[in-house]
Image (tube, helix red, strand yellow):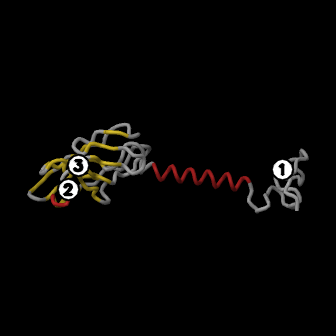
Amino acid sequence: MSRDRLDDGGRPGDGRDDGGWAGDGRDGEAATGTTRRVVLGAGAVAAATALAACSGSGGPGEGATPSPVSGIPTADIPVDGGKVIAGTGVVITQPARGTFKAFDAVCPHQGCEVNEIADNVIRCPCHGSTFDATTGARIAGPAPRGLTTLSVTVTGSSISVP
């Protein structure tokens, strides 16, 4: 069977220039049975899915409102580090012994959740933005601004973020 393209000036669907392969006997399909329309549609779906996965629950840089957090043991937050509180959208840091800070854990670039806090730097895994663990200010990366500061209450050995 020849793999040359048909080019006889016909119109789609008339059996002449149907976008198929010469001699395949099919109207509008390549030898694999996949139409151009199917391939283009699949590409559009894949692009939309990738964009949605990176954008968070709001638009770019807009995350969900952080949930209140209470009862986090101070011992769970390392000095010069911190912890993202799972399922809350809150990151708590301890930039100096006995000093606790809290921030919205959603990166203002495209809504990814930060995931690493070490050496007083908060890192976003998606595009490499970094933030100061004391102030939440943007250090580097594509984020247009720093992390939103949240209030923190320490009672005894327990941390709350209202």
Q: Is residue 144 left or right of residue 32?
A: left
Quadrant of the drawing holding the N terminus: bottom right
Residue count near mark 1 (Cα–Cα under 10 Å), binned few <14, some 14–19, many ≥20: few
x 18%, y 53%: residue: 79
Residue count near mark 2 (Cα–Cα under 10 Å), binned few <14, some 14–19, many ≥20: some
**Amino acid on which the number 3 mark rests in the picture:** Ala
Residue count near mark 3 (Cα–Cα under 10 Å), binned few <14, some 14–19, many ≥20: many
Q: Do the residues labelled 3 and 1 touch (CB within 8 Å)?
A: no
x 44%, y 44%: residue: 59
Report x, y in % for residue 85: 27, 58
Q: Name the residue under label 3.
A: 102
Q: In this view, does 56 lie to the left or right of 149?
A: right
Report x, y in % for residue 149: 25, 43
Numbered circle sitting on residue 12: 1
Residue 140 sits in quarter: top left
Q: Which of 2 and 104 is in front in this view?
A: 2
Report x, y in % for residue 21: 84, 56
x 88%, y 47%: residue: 7
Disc 2, SS: loop
Instruction: Count how many numbered circles sit on residues in the image.
Output: 3
Q: Which comes sooner in the sequence, label 2 or label 1?
A: 1
Q: Which of 141 and 21 is in front in this view?
A: 141
**Amino acid on which the number 1 mark rests in the picture:** Pro
**Amino acid on which the number 2 mark rests in the picture:** Pro
Q: Which residue lies furthest to the left in this view?
A: 156
Q: Are marks 2 and 3 in contact (CB under 8 Å)?
A: no
Between disc 2 and disc 3, the foreground one is 2
Q: Which comes sooner in the sequence, label 3 or label 1?
A: 1
Between disc 2 and disc 1, the foreground one is 2
Asked if residue 115 shows in the view, the reply is yes
Numbered circle sitting on residue 78: 2
Residue 71 sits in quarter: bottom left
